[in-house]
Image (spheres, coloured by chain):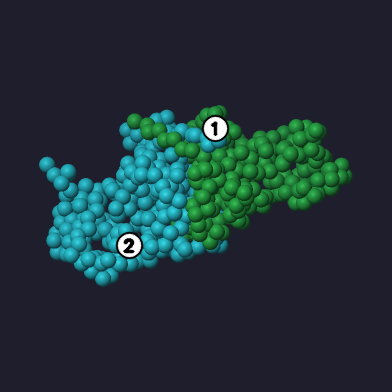
Chain colours: A green, B cyan
Amino acid sequence: MTETFTFNAIGTVHACYKEKFGVPRQPGLVNVLSSIEIHEPCNRPEAFRALNDFSHIWIMFVFHQTRQQGWHPTVRPPRLGGNERVGVFASRSMFRPNPIGLSVVELKAIRQQDDKLFLDIIGADLMDGTPVLDIKPYLPYADAVTNARSGYADTSPVIKLQVTFHAQAIAGMQKLNSCYPDLQQTIRDILQLDPRPAYAGAANNINREYAMRLHNLDVKWQVNGNVAQVVDVVLADSSKP
Amino acid sequence: MTETFTFNAIGTVHACYKEKFGVPRQPGLVNVLSSIEIHEPCNRPEAFRALNDFSHIWIMFVFHQTRQQGWHPTVRPPRLGGNERVGVFASRSMFRPNPIGLSVVELKAIRQQDDKLFLDIIGADLMDGTPVLDIKPYLPYADAVTNARSGYADTSPVIKLQVTFHAQAIAGMQKLNSCYPDLQQTIRDILQLDPRPAYAGAANNINREYAMRLHNLDVKWQVNGNVAQVVDVVLADSSKP
């Protein structure tokens, strides 16, 4: 009875988010610049003609890193503190029967480089390497339901942590300034949303060091109460000579 | 280089639209009631727990009837009169590299019937038999971009035709009133958007009879200027004993 459908990726995301930990939980929360490299046979400029008249686009993508992990009928959304369970179809969890994601992002530019075609996008919540299945123009008259009632997720996630930077982290970022001029702001934007699993918030351990991979960097921080202090920003081991 | 992904339908649409002709071009334009029958193993009520706290849901589906027909890099959207071409990724055309559709609809109810699970939805633009890949809650804070600029499709489609009913059509509908009490309104809502291919509008032929299959009925109409007259509503041949 169940039908099966096979799709090919039309493109791949290039982004600063190198691992799941740290990726914002919805688009539009952190204004990072990412790009989608379009693959053959879709990488023909005419396939995107008039798309730059649209300020926003939908990206349909595959949760590629977690897609082998299967799904459960209920999940614990971060919104509910990680304690309460809702149905997987009442959530935007990546652990779903068909691990397809949906994000609206701002389209900054359509860019040809050598024989490659890229879409530059702002605000994506997509990991580096994410396979893209489709791109559609965002149509406010059809897609923007402003009066929709939205249960447990009725407002934008609040800022949970104040972010400070240790002198060592500031020194580390200064060395990287030519490559990543917006690095400090990006780190602040990510950490203030508190990317830790929801259940970690309660069991606050001020000695625990968290780390996420951003670009080719390791960003390390500690949390004390409602303050996240970035303790170090260094080139990741695998990036060192 | 291109990755391939395989998905199973999690459900199937039951709708009055039995063929492509007549299906509204976006959701929310015609307030018909449809339903999605959820298949095993997703048909467990707990997989939808808390979804009824959301007024609207996303449906990701497969354009199943046209998916074998392939795609072209450019398409002629009805909005532009069917003459001008835009890139397929600048359109919501069903003829796309991965024929996946995206519609937001109103969720009316989650309904268990015997051992089956249904979602009743309002305003869908989905053909009967459409395979559903995913259902997600609509999150206004993330999904409703009210200030988005939307190129050639910046407003809701306008009402193009005034719809009248010939006495024969009215008699036909009266016989069917117990089965389809909202039939006249539904037909009016569909035809006033002018479902004919865009290029047919210009070559107006007042003798031409158009027909669409709605439920198990054939609805027949003619167009003269900006008036569509429904000339007959009858049980479709295949429905007759």
Q: Judge whether B77 appears above or below A69 on screen.
A: below
Q: Which residue is drawn at 49% across and 44% down?
A: A41
Residue B152, position as x, y percentages in the image: 47, 63
Rounded to the nearest angstrom, the CA distance separating label 2 from label 1 is 43 Å
Q: Where A9 falls versus B167 (above or below)?
A: above
Chain letter, disc 2 residue: B
Residue B29 visible to the viewer: yes
**Mark 1 = which residue?**
A67
Can you give x and y, in whole percent of width and height, for residue A114 in the image? 62, 49
Say whether mark 1 and mark 2 are on the same chain. no
The residue positioned 53% from the left and 47% from the top of the image is A43
Q: Do the residues labelled 2 and 1 touch (CB within 8 Å)?
A: no
What subunit carries mark 1? A
- Residue at 77% x, 47% y is A179
Q: Label 2 amino acid?
A: Tyr
On the image, the x and y values in percent for residue B143 come to: 53, 52
As helix, strand or loop, the secondary structure at mark 2 comes to: helix
Residue furthest out toward the bottom: B225
As drawn, is A29 to the left or to the right of B66?
right
**Residue under numbered circle 2:** B199
Task: Check disc 1 and give the amino acid type.
Answer: Arg
Categorize mark 2 by other alpha carbons within 10 Å: few (<14), some (14-19), many (20+). Answer: some
Residue in the image at 65% along x and 44% along y: A15
